[in-house]
């Protein structure tokens, strides 16, 4: 079957989808009696106008990179992991347990162990849905949704009954020891003489997230395992014929996905809050879906889309502060991005595809008529 | 626990099970036609907001109900467009709808009423009142006797307690939800439309070959789903509570989804599953932790029980739940 050129598939279609989503969002702003142009200006200056704004934008983007990658890895195996929220919640529990267990001497010692704790807990939370999908055919969408709720209840229980220091009212763990403090971008850039806002929560996890993007790219496109994951996603019967075990690949893909979600907790629990609180994930697990869909499940696209959503989050907070537009506008934009880049993809794709087909047919016809006419030289 | 407490818990079970039941039956219609719907939550939420907002503005709960149904149906049509017409991913569409509702309701509520993303409290005709059945002790008897209602019921006999506390005094939507169960069963298993609807969820090619429109049937199912979700959302905002607050569905759409699987996509079992999950909610609401002998079951366990039970059922350890065969797959007509 003839297809449209690759650049149109990878760039043009998502760009048009996102443009439609943003246009409708602007319509919503206009409909509630606010000025969309003013709002966009405020969002851009709030998110990129200062190192403080950049610091928040990149902090959010770090979260979204992890959850976006998590969704993308599972999606390559055609698994719809909607449970990044729960996996990141339980990952946060793992990070908190590691940070609180020892009087850590230095963050360089604490970080690897905390990463292990977060990834392990996140992966374990994905293991049961993965196993049930692989072995018993239980639909992973439903089980991961259920596990999100169970994770919320588990965190609630752990905070209220176990981790809350005696005498405290707020359901939150104790603050992590000094040695578990991760360097912020301010602290990292200061030796180089670069001024960066000290109030912004962006920290060394940003580089971990970027590294994770590269690692996932290598995994998916340069290793045997990645090939097997993608092969299974394209066609299960072909994968089985090639000797790939679907059970193994489903479980492994979900473990990687859950581990990446769990690693997000390094950023929000260890890097920002420095203690475990209720609902610390704040929906970042679900934004990962939008990020991955927009980034076409490619790590490079995920990184870009994560920064875009970081911008939307920080910009959204700014307009909520300075204009009478609630923060939830960002949720609307996010929903529209998911709707148009994910579910209504064909609505955008089909007209573009047929336009390319028509152009190609015209060109062929022209070439055919030129071939039939003898050239003047003969 | 005395008898009256038990009756009160069952009464609260019925109230809490009603939105679950309506949403569960909504999902049943949609999924039996082959359209997965994880957007039940979003449709309920937008219906809750629309019904509360319009009931407040117009002063009539019936106009509110209508607005709720229309709002929920609009989202249903979006889901239909994405998953039937444009053959998109039904799960992604459902996720988008949930977020769209979560965001839009607060944004619109804030710009409309400026009360922090909620609607003003509803009272009088803007709310569904309890329906007093004959011979039941209700608020009017309490007013006539000049004593609190709870006192009158506490002094009544057990049959009267069951009649007045458990069966009478609910809003009309509770009874509508209960009637919707046999109605759904009748439509699905005793009408031509129901037969075709079930067939299109199992084998759309066969339905298409018989000259019946797959697209038409699926749109019909999705719209029915919208109406029932609209009822569920309106019940939340105008009967169970008095007005809309941010995220007021609080995962009920997902519990309904769980109940749907728990009941294996069958109407009578759906009633059972929703009552069970309603009971869990009622107990969790009344007691902060349940004592069983020496061990206290924490409230969080009660809250997560519907989800755990669903996972167990899905795992197929206690009776296997098999979804409609063509569920989730867009139908492409052969050329």
Image: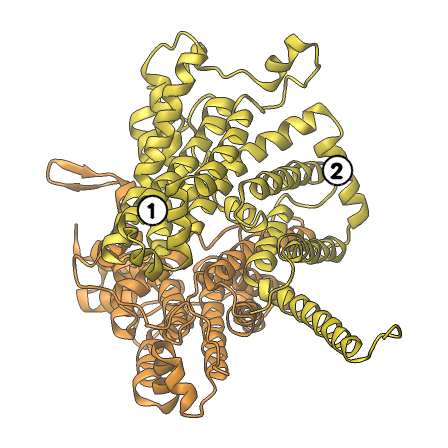
The residues tagged by marks 2 and 1 sit, at their Cα atoms, a distance apart of 37 Å
* Residue at left offset 50%, top offset 76%: B223
**Which type of secondary structure does the marked residue at label 1 adopt?**
helix
Image spot of residue A358 (x, y percent) = 71, 73
Q: Is residue B265 above or below residue A19?
A: below
Residue B15 picture quarter:
bottom left
Asked if residue B169 lies left or right of residue B221, the reply is: left
* Residue at left offset 34%, top offset 54%: A140
**Which type of secondary structure does the marked residue at label 2 adopt?**
helix
* Residue at left offset 46%, top offset 23%: A270
Q: Is residue A314 above or below residue B45?
A: above
Color used for chain A?
yellow
Q: Is residue A143 above or below residue B69?
A: above
Asked if residue B285 shows in the view, the reply is no
Color used for chain B?
orange
Q: Nearer the viewer, residue B229 or A343?
A: A343
**Number of residues whose C-alpha sits closer than 10 Å to that of mark 1, classed few (under 14), some (14–19) or many (20 or more):** many
Asked if residue B10 shows in the view, the reply is yes
Residue hosting label 1: A147
Q: Nearer the viewer, residue A306 or B38?
A: A306
Image spot of residue A240 (x, y percent) = 30, 57
Numbered tag placed on residue A44 in the rendering: 2
Q: Earlier in the sequence, mark 2 or mark 1?
A: 2
Image spot of residue A366 (x, y percent) = 78, 75
Q: Nearer the viewer, residue A317 or A358?
A: A358
Q: Given the image, what chain letter belongs to the residue carrying mark 1? A: A
Q: Given the image, what chain letter belongs to the residue carrying mark 2? A: A
Asked if residue B222 lies left or right of residue A26, the reply is: left
Residue ranking furthest to the left: B293
**Number of residues whose C-alpha sits closer than 10 Å to that of mark 2, classed few (under 14), some (14–19) or many (20 or more):** some
Numbered tag placed on residue B308 in the rendering: none
For the rendered model, the colour scheme is by chain
């Amino acid at each position: 079957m003839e297809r449209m050129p690759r650049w149109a598939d990878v760039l043009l279609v998502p760009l048009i989808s996102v443009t439609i989503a943003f246009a409708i969002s602007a319509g919503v702003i206009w409909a509630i009696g606010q000025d969309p142009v003013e709002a966009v200006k405020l969002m851009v200056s709030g998110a990129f106008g200062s190192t403080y704004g950049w610091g928040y934008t990149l902090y959010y983007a770090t979260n979204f990179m992890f959850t976006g990658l998590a969704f993308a890895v599972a999606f390559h195996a055609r698994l719809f992991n909607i449970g990044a929220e729960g996996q990141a919640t339980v990952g946060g529990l793992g990070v908190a347990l590691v940070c609180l267990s020892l009087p850590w001497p230095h963050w360089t010692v604490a970080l690897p162990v905390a990463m292990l704790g977060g990834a392990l807990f996140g992966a374990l939370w994905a293991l049961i849905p993965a196993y049930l999908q692989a072995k018993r055919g239980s639909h992973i969408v439903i089980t991961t949704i259920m596990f999100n709720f169970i994770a919320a209840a588990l965190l609630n229980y752990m905070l209220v009954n176990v981790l809350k220091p005696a005498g405290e009212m707020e359901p939150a763990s104790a603050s992590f020891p000094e040695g578990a403090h991760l360097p912020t971008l301010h602290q990292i850039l200061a030796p180089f003489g670069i001024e960066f806002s000290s109030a912004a929560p962006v920290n060394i996890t940003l580089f971990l997230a970027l590294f994770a993007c590269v690692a996932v790219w290598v995994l998916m496109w340069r290793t045997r395992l990645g090939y097997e994951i993608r092969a299974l996603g394209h066609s299960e019967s072909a994968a089985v014929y090639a000797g790939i075990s679907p059970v193994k690949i489903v479980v492994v893909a979900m473990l990687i996905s859950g581990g990446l979600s769990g690693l997000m907790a390094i950023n929000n629990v260890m890097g920002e809050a420095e203690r475990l609180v209720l609902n610390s994930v704040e929906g970042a697990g679900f934004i990962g879906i939008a990020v991955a869909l927009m980034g076409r499940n490619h790590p490079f696209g995920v990184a870009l889309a994560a920064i875009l959503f970081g911008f939307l989050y920080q910009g959204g907070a700014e307009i909520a502060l300075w204009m009478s537009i609630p923060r939830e506008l960002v949720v609307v934009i996010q929903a529209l991005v998911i709707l148009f880049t994910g579910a209504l993809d064909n609505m955008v794709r089909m007209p573009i595809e047929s336009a390319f087909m028509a152009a190609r047919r015209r060109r062929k016809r022209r070439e055919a008529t030129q071939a039939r006419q003898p050239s003047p030289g003969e | 626990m005395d008898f009256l407490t038990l009756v009160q818990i069952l009464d609260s079970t019925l109230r809490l099970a009603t939105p679950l039941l309506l949403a569960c039956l909504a999902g049943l219609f949609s999924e039996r036609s082959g359209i997965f719907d994880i957007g039940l939550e979003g449709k309920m939420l937008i219906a809750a907001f629309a019904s509360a907002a319009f009931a407040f503005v117009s002063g009539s709960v019936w106009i509110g109900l209508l607005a709720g149904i229309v709002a929920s149906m609009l989202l249903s049509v979006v889901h239909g467009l994405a998953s039937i017409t444009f053959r998109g991913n039904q799960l992604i569409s459902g996720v988008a709808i949930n977020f769209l509702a979560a965001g839009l309701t607060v944004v619109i509520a804030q710009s409309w009423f400026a009360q922090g993303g909620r609607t003003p409290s509803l009272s009088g005709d803007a709310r569904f009142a309890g329906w007093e059945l004959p011979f039941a002790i209700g608020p009017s008897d309490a007013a006539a006797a000049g004593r609190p209602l709870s006192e009158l019921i506490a002094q009544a006999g057990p049959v009267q307690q069951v009649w007045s506390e458990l069966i009478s005094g609910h809003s009309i939507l509770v009874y509508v939800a209960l009637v919707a169960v046999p109605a759904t069963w009748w439509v699905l298993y005793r009408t031509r439309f129901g037969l075709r609807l079930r067939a299109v969820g199992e084998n759309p090619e066969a339905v298409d070959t018989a000259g019946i429109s797959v697209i038409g049937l699926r749109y019909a199912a999705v719209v029915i789903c919208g109406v029932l979700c609209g009822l569920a959302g309106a019940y939340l905002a105008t009967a169970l509570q008095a007005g809309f607050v941010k995220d007021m569905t609080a995962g009920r759409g997902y519990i309904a989804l769980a109940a749907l699987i728990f009941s294996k996509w069958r109407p009578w079992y759906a009633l059972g599953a929703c009552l069970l999950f309603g009971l869990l909610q009622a107990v969790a609401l009344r007691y902060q932790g349940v004592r069983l002998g020496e061990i206290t079951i924490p409230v969080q366990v009660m809250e997560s029980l519907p989800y755990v039970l669903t996972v167990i059922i899905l795992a197929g350890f206690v009776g296997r739940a098999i979804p409609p065969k063509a569920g989730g797959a867009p139908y492409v007509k052969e050329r």
